[in-house]
Image (spheres, helix red, strand yellow):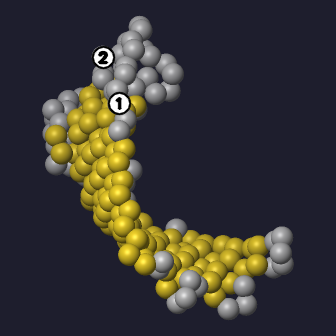
Amino acid sequence: PSRTDTAWSPRAGLVYQPSATQSYYVSVSKSFQPSAENFNLTASNAAFGPQETTSKEIGTKLDLFEGKASATAAVFSVERTNITTTSPTTNITTALGTQRTNGLELTFAANLPNDWKISAGYALLDAKITSSTAASKGVASVPDGIAAQGKKATLTPDHSANVWLTKALDAKWTAGGGIT
């Protein structure tokens, strides 16, 4: 099979920085990914149009403690249309529909005494299939006969967090560790 997909991928953003220690932004973008994203257009995926993603985000960054720390916060919405899924048992690609992920992300980073640094982050995600006609055998993420619409999207946690701590050993070496 052969096919050519073309689309615009517009992006726009605006940053407002009322002082040297604070900035606020808003951004919107749209992108697309052809159904043969792994460079193998086959009979099972040639019928599906490109996956389109629309992202909207608003956020802030604040420098704290005379530049020794910073904090960010962002709320966002990502909508993916024309998503597909492949059955692990039949290897057949099936149209799944539209997925929306709404979220909040918070980060904090600081320089600590004695050349230590800490960074931490937290994300709250609400990922759902917002529209779908999938409810048939062979749909990987949908049990037989159950509609996908309204279900939680797979591979997306409700909560995600991380903490990372590093220490500069000298001018060339740093050691660190963390948890996610």
Residue 47's disc is: 2
Where is residue 150? Give x, y as percent.
16, 48
Amino acid found under the numbered disc labelled 2: Ala
Residue 8 position, x and y percent, is: 35, 30
- Residue lying at 47% horizontally and 79% vertically, measured from the top left: 21
Looking at the rendered structure, the secondary structure element under dot 1 is: loop
Other residues around mark 1 within 10 Å, as few (<14) / some (14–19) / many (≥20):
few
Mark 2 vs mark 1: give the one in front.
Answer: 1
Contact between labelled residues 1 and 2, with CB atoms less than 8 Å apart: no
Q: Crowdedness of circle 2 by 10 Å Cα count: few (<14), some, many (20+)? A: some
Q: In this image, 99 relative to 180: left or right?
A: left
Which amino acid is tagged 1? Trp
Determine which quarter of the picture holds residue 156: bottom left
Image-based side of 166 in relation to 154, left or right? right
- Identified at 72% across, 80% down, the residue is 167
User: Can residue 142 be seen?
Assistant: no
Residue drawn at (34%, 26%) of the image: 7
Residue 140 disc label: none
Which numbered tag is attached to residue 8?
1
Displayed quadrant of residue 35: top left
The N terminus: image quadrant: top left
Mark 2 and mark 1 lie on one chain; the one further toward the N terminus is 1
Q: Nearer the viewer, residue 98 or 106?
A: 106
Q: Nearer the viewer, residue 139 or 150?
A: 150
